[in-house]
Amino acid sequence: MPQQQNRPVFLNLFQIKLPPTAIVSILHRVAGVLLILFLPFLIYLFDMSLQDKLTFTQAAELVDYPLVSAILYILLWAISHHFVAGIRYFLIDFEMISSRSAARTSAVIVFIVGLLVPVFAWFGNQL
Amino acid sequence: MKNINGLGSWLWQRIAALYLALFLIYFISSFICMEHFNYTGWLQWHTQPVNSVLIFIGFFMLVVHAWIGIKDVIMDYVHPVMARALVMMLFAFMLMSCLVWASRILLVAILK
């Protein structure tokens, strides 16, 4: 494969302007990786919640710590974004989203819906 | 060993995704419909026969989905062969441990 040796490379992430479809796609990945990395922690919480009444209450207290609840809100965003972005990929697979404009609009919707879930959960918890 | 990681993993990724999506909807709606959320209700939901089987399948599907996903990410970003193999083995070990650990937690709860 002949390749030009000193071809210009322009990969400054702060100057490349990505379309919404690309942003949603990258966030789908980021969310997935995030969920995998925190999976042991989630299983740890799952363990506490099922052992007995005492550990259940302790888990509920642990979740209320600012750092822990911040992490869980981020994970809530990750799962809701991964979920809606995944539905979008299914629609693309079944050719229900095929035009350029539909791809863009649906990407924006995915981004907004993914954010709305943790935001609503946060507001719900403040009440 | 033909068709390594080709259509097979593409299809499994989607089968697992579909299962997990439906399970998530079922899981959330179960607790929205529950009148008082407390330890007893939470434990009962998980140890109920049909639910516990669905959860076990869910753990398996989650690990399958996570493995195919992380494998694709690693192949995109980690290029040296040895480093790639090492990172992949690390995640494979981590995900398998998670599967055994989570299953054990549920089993202990059921047998209680």
Image: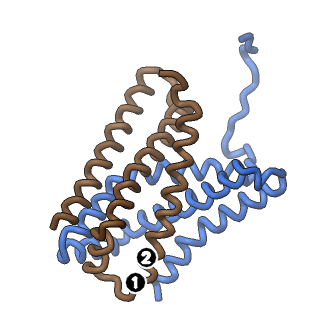
Chain colours: A blue, B brown
Quick one: A118 or A90, which is closer to the camera?
A: A90
> Above or below — where is B89 with respect to A61?
above
Task: Describe the element under mark 1 as helix, strand or loop.
Answer: loop
Circle 2 packing at 10 Å, graded few (<14), some (14-19), many (20+), is: few
In this rendering, position of residue A44 left or right of residue A79 = left
The residue where tag 2 is placed is B30
In this rendering, position of residue B103 left or right of residue B6 = left
For image coordinates 17% across by 64% down, the residue present is B111
Task: Name the spot of residue B102 as percent of width and height, x first.
Answer: 29, 55
Circle 1 packing at 10 Å, graded few (<14), some (14-19), many (20+), is: few
For image coordinates 42% across by 65% down, the residue present is A72
**Mark 2 residue type:** Ser
Kindly identify which numbered label has been placed on residue B34.
1
Chain letter, disc 1 residue: B
- The residue most toward the front is B50
Residue B39 appears in view: yes
State whether discs 1 and 2 lie on one chain.
yes
**Mark 1 residue type:** Met
Task: Name the spot of residue B58 as percent of width and height, x first.
Answer: 40, 56
Whole-angstrom CA distance, mark 1 to mark 2, is 6 Å
> Above or below — where is B26 with respect to B35?
above
Q: Are marks 1 and 2 in contact (CB under 8 Å)?
A: yes
Chain letter, disc 2 residue: B
Q: Quadrant of residue B49?
A: bottom left
